[in-house]
Image (spheres, rainbow, N blue to C red):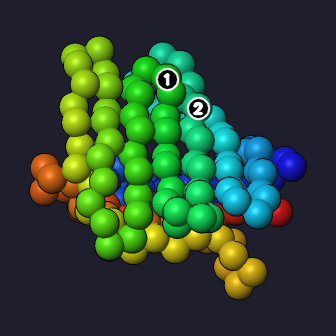
């Protein structure tokens, strides 16, 4: 199903930016895919947010000039990576909050910290 998604990340100091997206939802997972082009990038990145309802775990991937995979599970430490032309950096992710869209809200919110001392709040609003 085609929808729109509004996303923002505290790390980037962003306001909400809105993009067309593809949304899929079934009994075991929810998936949203969209494209974004960051300032200075030569090409768009493709983002995929995949929430496993059984494991209560969300994987956010980015493919493009920067590649990343980050796994979020509330109250757990998980792993991820960020790859650029300069190399790949392993990440340890500690997720404090993982709120996913449901019957009450169309908002995804992740509050997490990385082993490098970086803290972030990531929000995505699904617009049907």
Q: Residue 84: x, y in percent?
A: 31, 22
| Label 2 crowd (10 A; few <14 / some 14-19 / many >=20) | some
Of 115 and 122, nearer the camera is 115
> Would you place residue 88 above or below residue 117 in this image?
above
Q: In the figure, residue 78 lies in which quadrant? A: bottom left
Side (left or right) of 29 relative to 15: right
Return the mark for residue 64: 1
> Would you place residue 126 above or below residue 99 in this image?
above
> Would you place residue 68 above or below residue 114 in this image?
above
Q: In this orientation, does residue 76 appear? A: yes
Q: In the figure, residue 110 lies in which quadrant? A: bottom left
The residue at which mark 2 appears reads as 46
Q: Residue at x 31, y 36 (%)?
A: 81
Q: Residue 79: x, y in percent?
A: 29, 47
**Of label 2 and label 1, which has the lower sequence position?**
2
Q: Residue at x 67, y 42 (%)?
A: 33
> Would you place residue 86 above or below residue 123 in this image?
above
| Label 1 crowd (10 A; few <14 / some 14-19 / many >=20) | some
Q: Which residue is drawn at 59% across and 57% down?
A: 51
Side (left or right) of 33 relative to 128: left
């Amino acid at each position: 199903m085609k929808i729109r998604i509004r996303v923002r990340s505290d790390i980037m100091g962003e306001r909400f930016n809105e993009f067309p997206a593809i949304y899929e939802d079934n009994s075991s997972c929810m998936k949203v895919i969209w494209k974004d082009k960051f300032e200075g990038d030569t090409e768009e990145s493709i983002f995929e947010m995949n929430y496993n309802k059984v494991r209560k775990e969300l994987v956010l991937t980015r493919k493009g000039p920067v590649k990343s995979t980050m796994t979020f599970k509330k109250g757990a430490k998980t792993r991820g990576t960020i790859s650029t032309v300069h190399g790949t950096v392993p990440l340890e992710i500690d997720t404090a909050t993982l709120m996913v869209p449901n019957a009450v809200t169309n908002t995804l919110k992740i509050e997490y910290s990385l082993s490098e001392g970086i803290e972030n709040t990531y929000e995505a609003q699904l617009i049907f």
